[in-house]
Structure formats: C-alpha cells, structure tokens
C-alpha cells in the first residue's frame, strides 16, 4: 500500500488513462477522487471502480465548475491531470472552433485546473500531467491536438520551477497511441487502430494500465529526484 494515508485527485479519471490511474492509485492505498465533465460521468466511473473513491464534476473549460470542484478538495498529496479532448482535422479542413476548443480544453483548461488546485496541494505533493508524443512528431490532422499538448511541456517546465520551493514535484507522462475510449470518440475503426499499431516499434497500441504504472511511479518516492520530466510511454513510437 504505497500510498496509504495519502489523498489523490485524478482530473479526467472518469475515462481512459485517467480511469486506469485512479484505479491503480486507489488500489495502492490513496483515498482517490475522480472527476468527469459532469458529476454523472464521474459517478459512473466510481461505480465501475467498485471502491470507496469519490466523484466530482469538473468541466475544465468553465471557471465556475473548476472553482466549485476545488472548493471541495483539500490536503492533496497527488494531483493527476489527464482530462482532455481528442480532435483531428487536416489544416485545410480545420475550423476556428475546432482548433480553439481543443487548445482551450487541453492547454488553457489544464492551466486553469492546476492554478485553482495549487493552494490545495500539500507541501511535498506530486503533480502529474499527461502530454503526448504528438507534441513533437507530425501526425496527419493532429495540428490542434499537437499544439495543445506541446504547450503542456511549457506548463511542466513552469510548474516545476514555481512549485519546487514547496517540495512539490512536477512531471508528465507523454502518451503514444493508447487503446482507450478516446479512439471510439474520435471515430477510429479497427483498421485505423491496426494501421497505427503497425507504426509502433513494439507492434501494438498501449494499454491504459501501462500508463497508470508510469503515473504511479511519478507520484511515488521511487521517483524522488525526477522533476520537470516527460516520461515517454509509447512503445517506441516517437523514436521510430
Ligand atoms: N489515448 C490515446 O491514444 C492518447 C494519445 C495521446 C494523447 N491523448 C490525450 O490524452 C487525454 C486523455 O486521453 P484518454 O485516452 O484517457 O481520453 P478519454 O478516454 O477520452 O478520457 C478523457 C477524459 O477527459 C475528460 N474531459 C474531456 N473534456 C473535458 C472537459 N472539458 N473538462 C473536464 N474533463 C474533460 C473526460 O470526461 P467525461 O468522461 O466526462 O467526458 C474523460 O475523463 C486526451 O486529451 C487525449 O487526447 C490520448
């Protein structure tokens, strides 16, 4: 029970890699709260977790929603932010709304969530964000997604410097293609999945549980001198 006696909040824990991270943190002993865009999606996740985790609605594009959720949180040891949206459109077909909504959610939203929750972190807490290998590598149609996640590298750098005086460690997990609900939401077919899997040196998509292990490592004392780092979990996709 590595995290016994600790509290964790997983923003985006209602689905995908956030759900897997919440599940693992909870099983390792952390009293865990998960958020979804609404209390309903968060509660559904808590029901699936089958554990005493707590559910909160938090829409990272709405200041009032972030403030309301933050007011219900205190004394956090572990803050994980995986929430975000997936959007693909080649440049010529992109809309102003598609681009700005992606950046607003993934980049501005993450910034706003962390800003609101920093006062709720204990000294010595760990902050883990998620970014993506797409931030550094071209992928057809991923302009908005890549731009929004590239901005997160700046946030990791900034937060790592600004929160270090309080002993708060800040790192990120950089995702390759991971099999989650996000693929269904983006309309990906079985052919799409196998086509992408063929571009991964390990020859398959990653599992959300494999990302959760990286999150737990960065949240644990096992990574006590790792700070301002992006841990790549992508089956070698970014070095191909
Ligand atoms: N899976 C991959 O292959 C992959 C690769 C690279 C990057 N990423 C990125 O990593 C992030 C997480 O991926 P995933 O696979 O875990 O995605 P996912 O299964 O679709 O989960 C997304 C999570 O973000 C929450 N969310 C979405 N919009 C939100 C908003 N406006 N405010 C607050 N929460 C919001 C969702 O809440 P609800 O359940 O309420 O909708 C859900 O908890 C996404 O941004 C995705 O683009 C994923």
Image: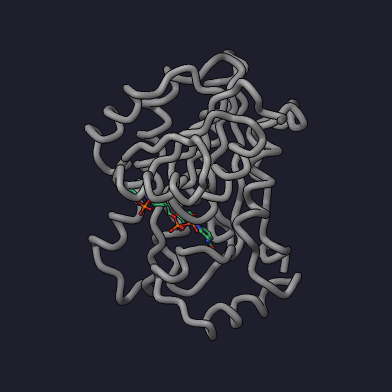
* Residue 132 position within the rendered picture, expressed as x and y whole percent measured from the top left: 56, 55
Q: Quadrant of the C terminus?
A: bottom right
- Residue 104 in view of the camera: no
For residue 240, side relative to residue 94 (left or right): right
Q: How many numbered discs, if any?
A: 0
In this rendering, the answer to whether 120 lies above or below 214 is above
- State the residue in front, 24 or 48: 48
Residue 74: image quadrant is: top left
* Residue 24 position within the rendered picture, expressed as x and y whole percent measured from the top left: 62, 43
* Residue 183 position within the rendered picture, expressed as x and y whole percent measured from the top left: 47, 69
* Residue 92 position within the rendered picture, expressed as x and y whole percent measured from the top left: 32, 76
Identify which residue is drawn at 40% across, 41% down: 35
User: Where ligand 1 lies, by quadrant?
Assistant: bottom left
In this rendering, the answer to whether 221 lies above or below 188 is above
Identify which residue is drawn at 35% across, 50% down: 41
Identify which residue is drawn at 37% across, 45% down: 43
Q: How is colour applied across the structure in the image? A: one colour
Q: Residue furthest bottom?
A: 191
- Residue 239 in view of the camera: yes
Q: Quadrant of the N terminus?
A: top right
In this rendering, the answer to whether 202 lies above or below 121 is below
For residue 238, side relative to residue 63 (left or right): right
- State the residue in front, 191 or 238: 191
């Amino acid at each position: 029970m590595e995290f016994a006696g600790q509290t964790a909040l997983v923003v985006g824990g209602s689905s995908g890699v956030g759900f897997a991270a919440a599940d693992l943190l909870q099983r390792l002993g952390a009293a865990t709260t998960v958020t979804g865009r609404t209390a309903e999606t968060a509660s559904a996740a808590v029901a699936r977790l089958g554990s005493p985790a707590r559910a909160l609605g938090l829409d990272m594009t709405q200041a009032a929603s972030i403030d309301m959720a933050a007011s219900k949180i205190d004394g956090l040891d572990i803050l994980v932010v995986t929430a975000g949206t997936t959007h693909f459109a080649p440049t010529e077909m992109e809309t102003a709304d598609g681009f700005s909504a992606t950046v607003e959610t993934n980049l501005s939203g993450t910034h706003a969530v962390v800003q609101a929750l920093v006062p709720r972190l204990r000294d010595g807490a760990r902050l883990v964000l998620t970014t993506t290998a797409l931030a550094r590598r071209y992928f057809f149609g991923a302009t908005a997604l890549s731009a929004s996640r590239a901005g997160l590298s700046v946030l990791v750098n900034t937060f790592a410097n600004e929160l270090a005086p309080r002993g708060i460690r800040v790192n990120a997990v950089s995702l390759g293609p991971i099999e989650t609900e996000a693929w269904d939401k983006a309309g990906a077919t079985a052919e799409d999945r196998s086509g992408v899997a063929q571009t991964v040196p390990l020859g398959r998509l990653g599992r959300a549980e494999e990302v959760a292990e990286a999150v737990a490592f960065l949240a644990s004392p096992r990574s006590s001198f790792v700070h301002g780092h992006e841990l790549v979990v992508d089956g070698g996709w970014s070095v191909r």
